[in-house]
Image (cartoon, grey):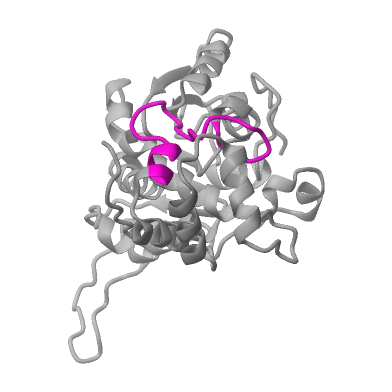
Amino acid sequence: MTWEVVPPGAHTPVMLREVMETLAPRPGEVIVDGTFGGGGYTSAILSSGASVIAIDRDPAAIVRAHALAAEAPGLTVAEGRFGALDTLVRAAGHDAVDGIVLDIGVSSFQLDEGDRGFSFRFDAPLDMRMGGEGPNAADIVNNADENGLAHLFRTYGEERRAGALARAIVADRPFHTTKELAGLCERVIRASRDGIHPATRAFQALRIAVNDELTELANALGAAQAILREGGRLVVVSFHSLEDRIVKRFLAERTKVQAGSRHAPVANPAEPPFAAITRKALLPAEDETRVNPRARSAKLRAAVRTGAPAIALDIGTLVPAVRMKGIPT
């Protein structure tokens, strides 16, 4: 099956074929696109005959969503964090939905809008805020203590030279632009053999911290569990190991029958709240990665909601904590 995709801007949705096959929207259903971005998934879902509640915290994405909604009566736009998608869905007049899709991380639009500070390809203020509120990347770089910065780069960026980079930042700050910080990364971190820019992991770590992305993801998974009706599908596309690890652990705990141990077996094991659609993560096809390099690191996991009660969400078991002193609130 093919789906008509008419996004309201130049945008290539990642793993669209796999998303639509696992999400399986049908006419009359209500589907949540928790990360509207450029509207690629939303456009495809609308073309299936389902209606969409599109969520995004980025004001620029909301403008694009309203532009599409003006031509698509089945689209409802909700501005806010997808970690609160259950609340946003209820505010839109629905007690339950038939499907949820999440495309995690930074969008192509945010990377290509140079003045937002997400990318080291452009010289711009060191911002990185998706919603425009709270401390930005410069606040963290210029005020966090050295140990906190090192822990941040190591935990959220998986940067091997985290300690050296933190020391260099503290010695050379303040930093105000992406060019200034990227230049320091180039001096401290050697270019990798796989061609990854020396600033890549540091910028990833700062972006995750500025937007509290991992906590938002965990909250969104819990919200999905609460708002999906029985038979509702959850589809998540992630782009790096930190995100995928959270999704994998969340679904593993909620698709496994709790049978106890051989010493203390459970007589009537409870049905888990989800059943797996994908036994393991799906990867993009080679034909897609050839034309869309952003898809190379993507992984898709999907599950269907059963009628069993939800399992309580414990953020501490899913999200690695990073504590930094000196960050303004």
Left or right of 143 in this view: 68: right
Determine the residue positioned at 69% across, 34% down: 12
Residue 319 percent across, percent down from the top left: 34, 58
From the viewer's perspective, is 187 left or right of 250?
right
264 versus 316 height, above or below = below
Magenta-drawn stretch contains 102: no
In this picture, which residue range is highlighted in magenta?
A: 117-142
Placement of the C terminus among the 4 image quadrants: top left
For the point 46% across and 26% down, which residue is it? 58
Residue reaching furthest to the bottom: 263
For the N terminus, the quadrant is top right
Q: At 49% across and 35% down in the image, what residue appears?
A: 128
Residue appearing at x 81%, y 43% in the figure? 291
Q: Which quadrant would residue 135 be assigned to in this image? A: top left
Foreground pick, 294 / 7: 294
Position of 128 with respect to 270 (left or right) is right
Magenta: main secondary structure equals loop
Q: Position of residue 158 (x, y in %)?
A: 51, 63
Q: Does residue 101 lie above or below 240 as drawn?
A: above
